[in-house]
Amino acid sequence: MATCDDYGGGYDFKFADGDPPDEYQCHICTLVARDPQQVSCCSNIYCESCLDTLKEKGQGFICPTCRSSLEGKYFKDGRAERGIKSLKVYCTNTDSGCQWMGTIKDIDTHLNNSCTYQLVPCTNGCGEKIRRSTLKKHLTDNCPERIVNCQYCNRKGRYRLITSSCHFDDCPDLLIHCSNEGCNEKIPQHSLESHNETCLKAIIPCEYNTVGCNFTMKREERDKHNEESIKHHLDIAMKKIDALQLTNQVFKLNEYTEKKKR
C-alpha cells in the first residue's frame, strides 16, 4: 500500500472517540480521507490529492483496489465528507500542552486563530516560526528584524543592522576607548580627533623640535620636560641662530662676489 509521503494524504489526527470508521479511510494513504472522492468501480473512497498524485505519476490511472481504470470514474463524496468533518479530534499540539478538542471542520480555525501552542511565522519576516503565545515577545525582544534605536546615536533601524559593524563603523556617537596608553576615557567616535588634541596621555613632540629637540613625551609631561631642558633648548636655539647668521653671511658674500664680477 502506498504511503501518504508518496501521494499527499489524508487527516493524520489523534481522534477523540477512538479509531474512525473504516469507510472513511483512503485506500491509498490509509489515513482518513481529505476531500473524499468515491470511485464508481468499487465504491471505495480516496483523498482527492492522492488521486491527483496517482494520475500525475503517469504509471496508469487505475484503482489501487480493483485495478479498474479511474478515468472519469470518481466523484466528490459529500456524505463521507460531512461524516469526516464531524469526527472529533485533538489539537495537533496536544503533546505540547494544548487541551483543545473539536471537529475536523473546526480545527483549522483553532490552529490559525487561537491555539497558543501553534507555530506561526514571524510577522517581521525573519523566517522563524514561533509559538503564538510567545510571538509578541519575539517581535519586541528577540527578532533580528525588529525595529530598534541605536543606543548611541538613536538612529532607527532593524536590530541586525543597527547592532552590526556596518552601522557601528559609521555611528558618530559610538563610544570608543581612547587609544592613548593610560587614558581610560570613552569618547564619541566623532570627537576622537579633537580629544586627541587635548588628551594628556597623547604622545607629542617637543615644542622646540623646530630648533632641533627631537624628544617626544606624553602631553602631561611637557611642562616637566621644558623645565628640565631649559639649558638644552637654549643651546640648540643658539646653534640654530648661529647657523642662520652664518648662512646669511654666506649669502651676502656670494651676492657681493657676483656684483664684483659684473
Image: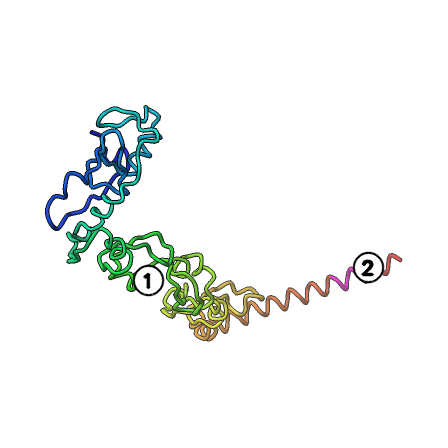
Query: Measured from the top left, where is residue 49 in percent x and y?
Result: 30, 38
Q: Nearer the viewer, residue 65 or 145?
A: 65
x then y, percent, for residue 189: 45, 66
Q: Callout 1, which amino acid? A: Leu
Do tag 2 and tag 1 residues touch (Cβ < 8 Å)? no
What residue sits right under mark 2 in the picture?
A: 257
Mark 2 to mark 1: distance in Å? Answer: 90 Å
The residue tagged 1 is 139
What kind of residue is marked 2? Thr
Mark nearer the N terminus (2 vs 1): 1
- SS at circle 1: helix
Q: Identify the residue at horizontal 44%, vertical 57% (top origin).
A: 166
Give the extent of the magenta segment. Answer: 251-258
Answer with the quarter of the image where residue 258 lies.
bottom right
Callout 1 environment at 10 Å: few (<14), some (14 to 19), or many (20+)?
A: some
Is residue 41 positioned above or below 236 on the image?
A: above
Whether residue 253 is in magenta: the answer is yes
